[in-house]
Image (cartoon, helix red, strand yellow):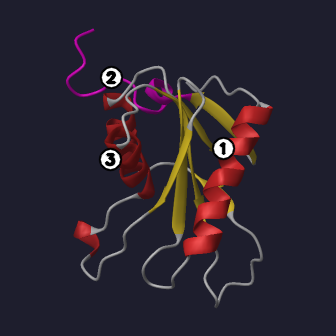
Amino acid sequence: MIKERPLTEADEQLVRAAEEVIEKQYRFGKHHIGAAVRTSNGDIFTAVHLEANVGRIAVCAEAVVIGKAISEGAHEFDAIVAVAHPHPHEDIDHCWVVAPCGMCRELISDYGDNIDVILPYKGNVKKCNVMELLPEKYGSSD
């Protein structure tokens, strides 16, 4: 069960960072999801997903941003969010928060079981602990 919590100003800043990176780097057919991760010391990293003609080899923005943060020396994470950018043919004029896919839920939890995930929930944007999105995680020792 998800114990949803409202967003803080720091969480809103994280959402804006994800929106900014995808608004700047959006490319139809290449990049339409942006992500931002906040480290436990408050640093924010951003990245976009990598689309591929063969869907199986596409790389989610959450994975890219975690890899980017780790490559820069960050190893402890506090919160993560992903946002989608509208395509030119869509009648939408703003980005929106999206929930992580199952593989990203696994990946995020591999890098910290106390990471908050910002996601749409019951018509609002909320946050919850990643383990609430992945009950009975594979490989869990509990």
Q: Considering the numbered disc 3 on the image, is that residue within a helix, a strand or a loop?
A: helix
Q: Which residues are magenta?
A: 129-142
Q: Residues within 10 Å of mark 2 (few under 14, many from 20)?
A: few
Badge 1 amino acid: Leu
Q: Nearer the viewer, residue 14 or 117?
A: 14
Q: Picture coordinates of residue 6 (x, y %)?
A: 76, 30
Q: How far is the residue under mark 3 from the one under mark 1? A: 21 Å
Could you tell whether 47 is left or right of 126 in the image? left
Does residue 74 belong to the magenta stretch? no
Q: Residue at x 30, y 77 (%)?
A: 52
* Mark found first going from the N terminus, 3 or 1: 1
Q: Which mark is residue 103?
A: 3
Residue occupied by mark 1: 14
Eye-nearest disc, 2 or 3:
3
* Mark found first going from the N terminus, 2 or 3: 3
Does residue 132 belong to the magenta stretch? yes
Q: Considering the numbered disc 2 on the image, is that residue within a helix, a strand or a loop?
A: loop
Q: Picture coordinates of residue 35 (x, y %)?
A: 53, 53
Residue occupied by mark 2: 136
Residue 123 visible from this viewpoint: yes
Badge 2 amino acid: Glu
| Quadrant that contains the N terminus | top right
Badge 3 amino acid: Met
Q: Considering the numbered disc 1 on the image, is that residue within a helix, a strand or a loop?
A: helix
Q: Residues within 10 Å of mark 3 (few under 14, many from 20)?
A: few
